[in-house]
Image: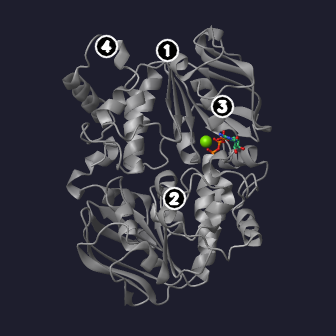
Amino acid sequence: MGTAEEDVVLRTEAITKSYAGARALENVSFDLRRGEIHALLGENGAGKSTLIKSIAGSVRPDSGTITIDGHRADALTPTSAAALGVGTVFQELSLIPQLSIAENIHLGREQRRRGLLDKRRMLADAREALAHIGVDLDPRRRVAGLPRAQMQLVEIARVLHRESAVLILDEPTASLSVGESARLFEILQSLRSRGIGIIYISHRLAEIKALADRVTVLRDGRKVGTVDTAGVTDDLLVEMMAGRSLDQLFPTVATTPGRVRLRASGLRTATLAGVSFEVAAGEIVGLAGLVGSGKSDIGRVCFGLDALQAGSVEVDGRALQRPSPIRAMRQGLIYYPADRHVEGLVRTGTLADNITLAPVAAGTMSRLGIVDRRAGADRVQTVVEALAIRPADPGRPILGFSGGNQQKALLARSFARDFGVHVFDEPTVGIDIGAKADVYAHMKRLCEAGAAVVLISSDAEEILGMSHRIYVVREGRIVADLRGADRTEENVVRAFFDSQDSSSVTSGSPR
Ligand SMILES: Nc1ncnc2c1ncn2[C@@H]1O[C@H](COP(=O)(O)OP(=O)(O)OP(=O)(O)O)[C@@H](O)[C@H]1O
Ligand SMILES: [Mg+2]
């Protein structure tokens, strides 16, 4: 079943790339047809981002060729790749925080307009680009300070707004929830029907099977194979990715909830309108909701990162006075932020530095520079093994790890000490299926040791698979408390939207 050459919009031949002697890609040949969605799948560090960065011109391969739209493209740069029609949404977003949303959407294209920039036209244009993907944001707002999910939406709007022959999206739904993702999928499907070739990277198998026509699997920098998604099973994909099968993604957590360890009463902040809930020892409670619903703000305020206007947070029956990360941790509550780049990691440090840092989130950490000096090399090694961080090299700079391995380094901090309450915000964003299983097993262990676990997540499968109970958050309130047989995807998604406006569920547009 050969593909006629004119159907192929992009081809790579024998691409090889090493970083400091370590092979990231080896002889990878790949083709993308017009009007197809082609998924790239592989474990963390398999080489997915390196391949698409080579195509987008931001990484220079050591050898191999890339042909875009019939043009043999040697020595690609970001500018020449864009000129050949490659549009890319990168995994590590490329927005400029100091600029407005509108300026970011137009970045790099201003030179095409003659003379002065037409500000009004830029704003109208940006508004249209955002509306196209169903986002209600003021384009005059600065990008700095936007939550990661909204940055991701702006980045998507920016790339979709341009004419591309080849569209590349590297984990675009990582911090989006069901509603935003559904809207994005509709758009991608319509672009596909207009003949655009789309490369789509995701760790969510369900998403890949629903969306993609073919999937190419990478392992350790090599191509394992390309298969049609029609009829492919999860087992086969996992086997191709990992070279082994995975028995079970979600462990059975058979604990009986004990005493209440976390109690939030009437929390009010700039974004929360009176939130009350409790989590018991041995219990995993999911917080679900759309981007901007307030689910992450609940985690932040419990950890003292956002100011509380009213209400209280109690850990083990004791109220947190003037909540701050340090006080929260002293009383046994730890929070793992969703945005590893802005809040989580010490970007200038090594893997070991990031693991041994006392777990203080959000700037506080680097500001106070608190290092947990009891953490010896042994413990670092244990943690690296428990979470299967690759390469297992504590001395390597954190930024030299793939995205998923950076995420694991962030979670590694929960091994540092005993906490009674663990609040995870999107803990498995960007990590591969094997690593997810490791993280879930870790949550189970915490739970069995008597901790209370809060799981804030946009991934419906994860929330349903892991939580004893699910609170659905909408517009700064808890609108549903689902337990037992009521914990269904349908109930969760229904609660995302206004009951009288359930039509928006099917059309997929948020709010
Ligand atoms: N800037 C860099 N410096 C050194 N090594 C790097 C750099 N970027 C990537 N690597 C290494 O190259 C390999 C491939 O990384 P890449 O980011 O392509 O993986 P990936 O498949 O996108 O993973 P993930 O699912 O975690 O995003 C990894 O071993 C990674 O550690
Ligand atoms: Mg990647």
* Alpha-carbon span between mark 2 and mark 3: 26 Å
- How many C-alpha atoms fall within 10 Å of the one at disc 3: few (<14), some, or many (≥20)? many
> Which callout, 1 or 2, points to the residue nearer the camera?
2
Judged from the image, the secondary structure of the residue bearing numbered disc 3 is helix
Q: Earlier in the sequence, mark 4 or mark 3?
A: 3
Indicate the quadrant where residue 373 lies.
Answer: bottom right
Alpha carbons under labels 4 and 3: distance apart: 32 Å
Give SS at disc 4. loop
SS at mark 1? helix
Q: Which mark is residue 51?
A: 3
- Residue located beneath label 4 in the image: 113
Q: Which residue is mark 2?
A: 344
Label 2 Cα neighbours within 10 Å, binned few <14 / some 14-19 / many ≥20: many
Label 3 beta carbon within 8 A of ligand 1? yes
Query: In this rendering, is residue 230 above or below 386?
Result: above
Task: Give residue 382's mark.
Answer: none
User: Please, what is the three-letter code of the amino acid marked with disc 2?
Assistant: Gly
